[in-house]
Image (spheres, rainbow, N blue to C red):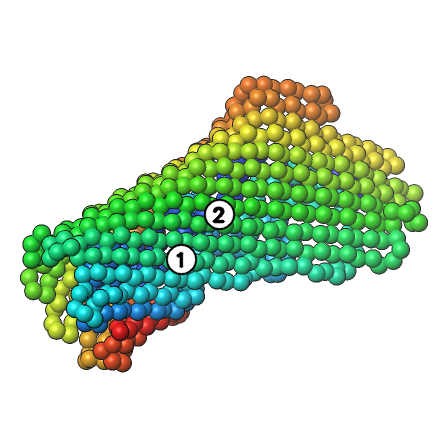
Amino acid sequence: MRAIHACFFNALLIFTTLFSSALVAQYNYESVTEKSFERSSLFFTSHFLNTFGLPRYREVSVGIIDDPFLNLQLNPASMPDIGSKSTYVYLDFRGDRTEAPIVYDYAYYDYATVGYDEYYRSSYFIDPRWYINTRTEPEPVFSLGLLTHPFGKNGNRNLLIGGSYQLIHRDEPFYTVPNWIYANQRGYDSFGATAEDASSIPIIDRSFGEDEMRISGHLFSGIAAYQLSSLISAGISVNGVLQDRDGIYSNKYSNNYNNADVYASEYSNDREQTYDHFDWSGGIKLQLTSKLAFGVKGGILNGNADQAYNNYNFYESDYNYSGAGTNRSENYGLGDTRQSWDQDGTTRYGRIYFSYQVEPGAQISGFFRSERSEVDLLNSSSINDTSYSFYHWTHDYSFYQGTHVSSLSDIRSGSGDREKTSHQAALNFNWELTPKNTLFGGIYVASRKNSINTLEAVSANRFSRGEWISDNDSDEHLNHVIEDKTLRWQYDASYWTVQIPLFTRFKLNENWGFMLGVNRILKNWDIEEQTLAVFDRRQITDLDGTTIETNFGERYTQPRQRITEEYTDVITSFDVNLSPQFGISLLLDPEFRDNFRIAQWWLGFHTRL
């Protein structure tokens, strides 16, 4: 029996040593703080009330769908036709698209399903598009828009004013994002080695905690346009976004089976975010001839995004440590991570637009839009982790004893910039085939280049020491690394898309109508990423002594990623006009995969007063 236990101990020691060296370490040496920033689809981007903004039609809707709010987004001087009445009111309720976004696997993780330990021991495939569009926000609870000719009742329709408001609000389970630098893992030290006793301790968990994420946002706009003459009109608009996101996941365990055995665990993870921007634009429209119109629009957007992340992890165990029995162990762990981001940016954009009436009932139009964003980055990170474990186990005449101590300190601050340049162009047509049937569509192309460059100063200190002894064997290890370095991270992503939308609208009678649309979409990404670590000093200490290196660099280049997506999306709209002044539209986005489902719906109401 003595020989069996000795073999067991030796095998356990060898397995632990080999396995720990093969682990994906939870401390990512050369990852930067900026990677953990959550970039929303609202950040530093013009927003407006898109009455036809289903995800796969959002980009192509402006300029192709004849709608007052879409026409004003094309150019605030467009003076859209709102009918014979002086006021137009729009209201809609939207369902979120029931499909996973790009980052679903790691932007939202269900702790209740997989459990805390499994989550932190899982490896993730990180989609390289994460850094340029982390999250797609929930659809607004409601969207309200109003346009009016304030002097219209007196026959003066030269002045148009209006605005819109959209509310975003959702309470949901807490979601997490990848732990790019360091993830506290109970049972593993900062080098990825097993730190705890291999024996299992029976635990009955009694817990309480929190699991919530709250997202709220206010999206608003105002517009004023004036018809100076039959040949020229001008307009201005302002758009704004105020958004908050905060949430926490926490749990606390405290167990006491008897006077000798104690187990306690406490974990909390919280994220906070505030974002706001104001977007000013102006435009001029020229009616060059009775058939040809031309417009110009320009704008500037200023925004700020602040985020904070805190992670606290405490673990303690006392198994018969008072020494009342021959087998005893003690385990302790404490981890604390605090990170913050501050981003200030400006986006400038411009658009030119034309429309030409080829013949009665047939029109072509097009636009070109260019945009450039520049965002200044500041971030900081402080990570500290400490663990200690001891066990003593005896059986018959054999004993086994081990001690393990580990610590980690990682302090860093960084700065940098994000730049985005995008171009969009569209050529559209509208053809009235019959008084009850209209065909319209076009081609839309866009390209974007995103670049992120950061410089991050890092001071890191990692220590791990362990000793294992038995009545006939012993072993120990020592790892101590001290680093002073600067990380230079460069990320470049190029994107282009070609989309071909085609719609046909049928007017059955004065009260009923429907529309059928299809959009053929091709998207392509080309992504490159590189990190350069420039070391002022690195000191490595192990059982063989100390090695010091100074003034050198290490470069990490990720494989070039090329990603292509292509799909066809079909939608339908049912229109009911209860009276000449009031109508209802139901937009449905069906999907045909393994089975039929409604991926998204919109219910819109419009009235003229």
Snapshot quadrant of residue 576: bottom left
Q: Residue at x 85, y 37 (%)?
A: 470
Q: Position of residue 339 (x, y in %)?
A: 58, 42
Snapshot quadrant of residue 194: top right
**What amino acid is at disc 1?**
Leu
Q: Position of residue 86 (x, y in %)?
A: 23, 69
Report if residue 149 is visible in the image. Answer: yes
Q: Nearer the viewer, residue 573 or 393?
A: 573
Is mark 1 in CB contact (under 8 Å) with mark 2? no
Q: Residue at x 77, y 44 (%)?
A: 332
Gap in angstroms between the C-alphas marked 1 and 2: 19 Å
Q: Which quadrant would the C terminus be assigned to in this image?
A: bottom left
In this picture, is 583 found above or below 207? below
Q: Position of residue 11 (x, y in %)?
A: 75, 40
In this picture, is 441 found above or below 449? below
**Which residue is identified by label 1?**
219
Give residue 452's mark.
none
Report if residue 114 is visible in the image. Answer: no
Label 1: state its secondary structure: strand
Tell me: 121 left or right of 583. Answer: right
Mark 1 and mark 2 lie on one chain; the one further toward the N terminus is 2
Q: Nearer the viewer, residue 427 or 220?
A: 220
- Foreground mark, 1 or 2? 1
Q: Residues within 10 Å of mark 2 (few under 14, many from 20)?
A: many
**Which residue is identified by label 2?**
38
Q: How many marks?
A: 2
Label 2: state its secondary structure: loop
**What amino acid is at disc 2?**
Glu
